Amino acid sequence: MSTNSKETLSGANWDTSDHAAARSLAKEAGELLVEIRKGIGTMLLADQARREGDTRSHEFLAHAIAERFPGDGLLSEEGADSDDRLRRERVWIVDPLDGTREFGEPPRTDWAVHVCLAVGARPVVGAVALPARGMVLSTAEPQRASEGTPGLLRLAVSRSRPPAFVERLAEVLEAELVPMGSAGAKAMAVVLGEADVYVHAGGQYEWDSAAPVAVAQSAGLHASRIDGSPLVYNQPNPWLPDLVICRQESAPEVLRALKATRAPA
């Protein structure tokens, strides 16, 4: 997908201004969260900071999207869902604070902000801010995925809730496990070359993966369900149980290994 010209899908459209908006929104929400996080240990307890971070980041993103894109729908982890979004071709899918646990544990950096625009159920525009690292990866300026390193594949997994099959998968792939926090942090680790594969099958929602998938695909990576089927967004039930993100050349091997381990679909 080009980021330099207007694209169309089922009568809807997106262009460079949408890519720039997603990046700007993720960056500004991340800066807000960094300021809130500075209060941990002095003005705020960790749980207070987590609640304030979730709430204020959501309020900022929801207000900004409604103001800039009044005709678009919104699905946010922290907002009340509505069937109205199902009638919209363009829907913003956001996670105002992905990795709430890690956010409350300074100086951890594995937390993120997700901002995605789905058009016709496809995540076509996205930005993932890694505020503690001072980074925003987005479709505005697609970053070509870094090359893998020689040796064992590095498999990014949840540090707190790794899927039950992940050790069997690591054996089949002859991979080493790299535990880390948020879904966005794990997906961006693959983009940045800090991991080779990110697999999740423990249950997620659309806001957990929409922006990371948009950014990963713009970087040339493979992203799909663990059975190889496409990831589809803006569905009546936003539950999206599993996904895999990896380099294109690794995808056949990874999908075969997933099938061999009988990972839950």
Image (cartoon, rainbow, N blue to C red):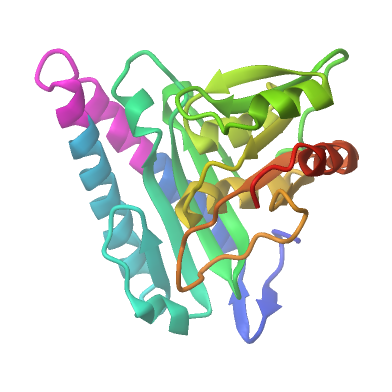
Q: Work out which residue is located at the far left of the displayed protein and give it.
A: 43
**Of the pair 219 and 18, the residue shown nearer to us:** 219
Quadrant of residue 254 within the rendered picture: top right
- For this rendering, which residue is in front, 172 or 80? 172
Q: Position of residue 56 (x, y in %)?
A: 22, 45
Q: Residue at x 28, y 36 (%)?
A: 32
Q: What stretch is highlighted in magenta?
A: 29-49
Q: Is residue 12 above or below residue 122?
A: below
Q: In this view, does 138 lie to the left or right of 4?
A: left
Q: Which residue is drawn at 24% across and 53% down?
A: 59
Q: Which of 123 and 25 is in front in this view?
A: 123
Q: Residue 48 vs residue 239: left or right?
A: left
Q: Is residue 41 magenta?
A: yes
Magenta-span inclusion, residue 196: no
Which residue appears at 67% of the width and 23% of the height?
A: 167
Q: Is residue 222 visible?
A: yes
Which secondary structure dominates the residues rendered in magenta?
A: helix
**Total number of numbered discs in the rendering:** 0
Residue 12 position (above or below residue 18): below
Across and down, in percent, residue 72 comes to 42, 75
Q: In which quarter of the image is residue 105?
A: top left
